[in-house]
Image (cartoon, rainbow, N blue to C red):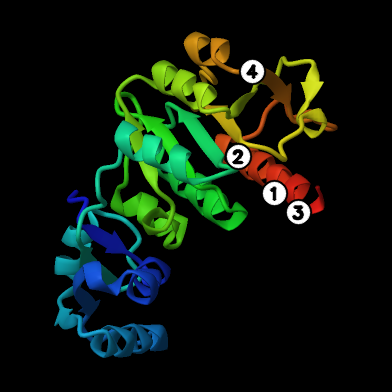
Amino acid sequence: MSESWIIGINAVGEALEHDARNVSEVWIEQRAKNPRLAEIASAAKAAGVKVQYVAPDAIGRAAGGGKHQGVVAQIAPARNLGEGDLDELLGRVEKPLLLVLDGVQDPHNLGACLRSAEAAGVHAVIVPRDRAVGITPVVRKVSSGAADRVPLMRVTNLARTMKTIQEAGVWIVGLAGEAEQSLYEVDMRGPIAIAMGGEGEGLRRLSREHCDYLAKIPMQGRVESLNVSVATGVAVFEALRQRQVG
């Protein structure tokens, strides 16, 4: 499935609202009855984006089997960001809030993490180039546009990048279920990076070793752990809460 397609009403609508210059054309399913598709068509035409009405099977192929709701859009691939862009951000932002995702492979999880990160004011999300998902149509759809607004920086060596972050004066807190300290006891009002592990494996050994703190989300029920995207939402909004209060 080409990474230049975004699928679904919300994803296409967000792209037209916030990133129309990178949208080349919109495909809408012929004879579709959803009134929101007419709104998409109007928004596209107002932004100078070409609109085509195509057969359902054509949209299905473009969506790669994803739930498209009768609309897809072709968009310029996300710009590749890496170590140099991170260095620039660390030199520019006085009190950065970063999110490090150590090997998230499910595009639904990455999309949800990006959505929470954007809502909480995270300055950048950092992921490894290997064994981790990048920006895909599913990621864009699930993120509801956040994938095009939050910088996603893919780095060659995550442990080395975490060391660079620390040398820039940013403290790293890693979430781990077996940690003794509660997340709510960690001071996240200053420059901070929150490190989350991938599905199943959690934070890898080298990533743990590069954390200044390990903390856990207190759990009251019988569930032993949270999905990475849910845990990410809890963590980034706790950081936002502390920054607003403190």
Mark positioned earlier in the residue sequence (2 or 1)? 2
The reply to whether dot 3 and dot 4 touch (C-beta < 8 Å) is: no
Residue for badge 3: 244
C-alpha span from label 4 to label 2: 18 Å
The reply to whether dot 4 and dot 1 touch (C-beta < 8 Å) is: no
Badge 2: how crowded within 10 Å, few (<14), some, or many (20+)?
Answer: many
| Residue 57 image offset from top left, x and y in percent | 16, 67
| Residue 30 image offset from top left, x and y in percent | 20, 83
Tell me the SS state at disc 2: helix
Mark positioned earlier in the residue sequence (2 or 3)? 2
Q: Nearer the viewer, mark 2 or mark 3?
A: 3
Mark positioned earlier in the residue sequence (3 or 4)? 4
Badge 4: how crowded within 10 Å, few (<14), some, or many (20+)?
Answer: few
Viewer-proximal residue, 144 or 163? Answer: 163
The reply to whether dot 3 and dot 1 touch (C-beta < 8 Å) is: yes
Q: Is residue 205 above or below residue 131?
A: above
Badge 3: how crowded within 10 Å, few (<14), some, or many (20+)?
Answer: few
Residue for badge 4: 212
Residue for badge 2: 232
Q: Amino acid at mark 1?
A: Leu
C-alpha span from label 2 to label 3: 18 Å
| Residue 166 image offset from top left, x and y in percent | 54, 23
Q: Is residue 47 above or below residue 70?
A: below
Mark positioned earlier in the residue sequence (4 or 1)? 4
Q: Quadrant of residue 181?
A: top right
Tell me the SS state at disc 4: loop
